[in-house]
Amino acid sequence: MAKEMDDVKYHEEYVTNPRGLQLFTCGWLPAYSSPKALIFLCHGYGMEVSGFMKACGVELATAGYGVFGIDYEGHGKSMGARCYVQKFGHLVDDCDRFFKSICALEEYREKSRFLYGESMGGAVALLLHRKDPTFWDGAVLVAPMCKISEKVKPHPVVVRLLTQVEEIIPKWKIVPTKDVIDSAFKDPIKREKIRKNKLIYQDKPRLKTALELLRTSMDVEDGLSRVSMPFFILHGEADTVTDPEVSRALYERAASADKTIKLYPGMWHGLTAGEPDENASPTRTSTSSSPTSSRGSTTAATATVRPGKTGRGSRRCSTRWPLPTAAAVATTARWHRTGRRSSGAAPASSAG
């Protein structure tokens, strides 16, 4: 199914994964030109792409990018038990297969390709990079799940007890944790709007899912030094869902020569959809600005390392808050330069 939205073309399609489940995919493309680069969306736990991430897709496509997303198994419009993650690697493999099938198309083979991951999707993006370290040209990571915050993690004793029964009752919704929507999205009006999206999972985490997320976050945290692609992290310092200190650790430990982190004082987990307008509105005015803009304000602390420079980067502040979509536009514009891969080599497709 394809739709026209002013300067953006939108389409939907279902693909089948190796486990026989139909997965929902969608894309936003510039209506009147070839995309200058490709951006692949990795959504968060319980979320979906066609509604929750629509504004992101439209904004990036309007800026000239080809944007593609997939609802993970059990999420959004995809088949599978609701928000049941039997094995986190399945999500990563499904994304890898679909994303690479797009990159292998004749018209896209020489396009630069970037990942955009929010929350759990940040972990998906990092594991996609680990799976094929030279394939991706960079990533924008929004409050990435490098570690689940201690404030929402069950007590270690509870985790041990749950581990003992995970193969017996894997789908039971019994994990004691705080409501993620209440913890993630600050603005009450926007929070209620999110609750009205029936494609978003709003029940307690399933036993196996919670343990898979916990193990994955530990694995990602242990492998921070293996990250070598360019990346841009954005994280609210008041985030109680994923730990901003581990985003800081990713910035410090990663082998990447080109990396940037922005930490936003007082801002919560839901940077793209949950902040009050007075926090979010500068995002829309800074779409074309540099993600490391001028000094002089006290809004967001920034550290940046560029190729050819050493050390931890300069600590600075920006006069505007280039939050996720704006950062993606500005950062990928710098990364891909001409919008074509320098090697000109066609990526191998793992679609099957």
Image (cartoon, helix red, strand yellow):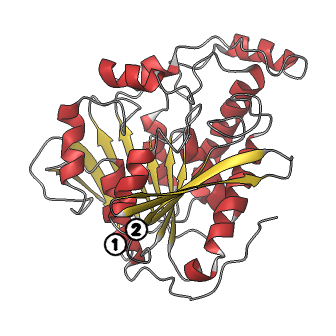
**Mark nearer the viewer, 2 or 1:** 2
Q: How dense is the environment of label 2, judged by Cα within 10 Å: few (below 14), some, or many (20 and up)?
A: many
Q: Which residue is mark 2?
A: 30
* Quadrant of res 96: bottom right
Q: Residue at 24%, 38% (x, y): give it.
A: 280
Residue under the image location 82 percent in, 64 percent down: 352
Can residue 310 be seen at all in this image of the molecule? Answer: no
Q: Residues within 10 Å of mark 1 (few under 14, many from 20)?
A: few
Relative to residue 348, is residue 40 drawn left or right? left
Residue visible at 13% across and 50% down?
319
Secondary structure under the numbered disc 1 in the rendered image: helix
Element under disc 2: strand
Quadrant of the drawing holding the N terminus:
bottom right
Q: Which mark is residue 18?
A: none
Of residues 112 and 101, the one drawn nearer to the viewer in this rendering: 101
Q: CA distance from mark 2 to mark 1?
A: 19 Å
Residue 113 at what x, y percent from top left? 52, 69
Where 347 sits versus 17, above or below?
below
Amino acid bearing label 2: Pro
Q: How many marks?
A: 2
Q: Nearer the viewer, residue 19 or 178?
A: 19
Residue corresponding to mark 1? 334
